[in-house]
Amino acid sequence: MKKFWFIVTGVLAYMIFMAVLTPASVWLKLVPMPPEVQLGKVQGTLWQGQIDVLSRPPVYLTNLRWQLELSALWRGQLGVQLNAGDVKDDSQPYLNVAASVSPGSYALQQATVRWPVAGIMRNLQLPMPVDASGAIVLNINNFAKGEPYCAALDGSASWQQARLKSPIGWLDLRQIDATLSCDQGNLRLVTMPDNPLALAVTADVMAGRYQLNGTLKPDASMPKEVHEAMRFVSQPDAEGRYNIQFGGQIRTQ
């Protein structure tokens, strides 16, 4: 009997060893992928590897690297460390993610994501054309998958080097900060009003759509044309704030 279990243990160890050391390119060939997904050169193994370029419009990632961690397998979870992009190149997406994956679910223990604003604006259906620059930076302390998006979320977001194009030219909004949370399965972002527009909004991302509600009150330092344009937004309230409200569909292609 001992010999039998010794053989079984040896076979299982060999299978795990071969699975881990098999080139990642072999595993990826076995995974059915949509035609719009394009992969560059694949290096490494299932355990640790790298893809030069991963593209699925509107997502474009360079130097995507992964590392699997087996320490949580006894809980039915597989640890994953993901990195992509270059933290010094703010013109391209960047991510640094520590996650755990279990059957039918996943969670983030820590994540930093930076995404150029221009790439985000192209996929939002806004009530009027808007051109913007800068980068959205997300810092996630905790996230758990739920329906339609989350079961838990604790984090922050900021629009860094925020600039908005207007008929009079580019407006420097400096930086706009916000908190991230989960509300009945939907993603929620709430901005802090300490910015040149005093932008105080709540944005909810629901299944395939988004909704934004809040107020703004341009600072006295903003160009007079900005203040004059507010009459096209709404009527000011007793404190001089202008209500804003709009929503739309989120394009995935």
Image: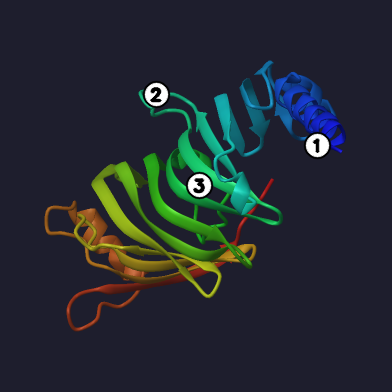
User: At x 80% / y 28%, what residue is drawn?
Assistant: 15
Residue 182 location in percent, x, y? 47, 67
Q: Nearer the viewer, residue 241 or 62?
A: 62
Amino acid type at circle 3 is Met
The quadrant holding residue 171 is top left
Left or right: where does residue 116 sit relative to residue 76? Answer: left
Residue 211 location in percent, x, y? 50, 69
Considering the image in quadrants, where does the N terminus appear? top right
Q: Earlier in the sequence, mark 3 or mark 1?
A: 1
Left or right: where does residue 217 sit relative to residue 147? Answer: left
Give the residue number, with chain letter if any, for mark 2. Answer: 89
Give the residue number, with chain letter if any, for mark 1. Answer: 33
Give the residue number, with chain letter if any, for mark 3. Answer: 121
Against 101, residue 182 (above or below) is below
Inter-mark Cα distance, 2 to 1: 29 Å
**Element class at badge 3:** helix
Left or right: where does residue 88 sit relative to residue 99? Answer: left
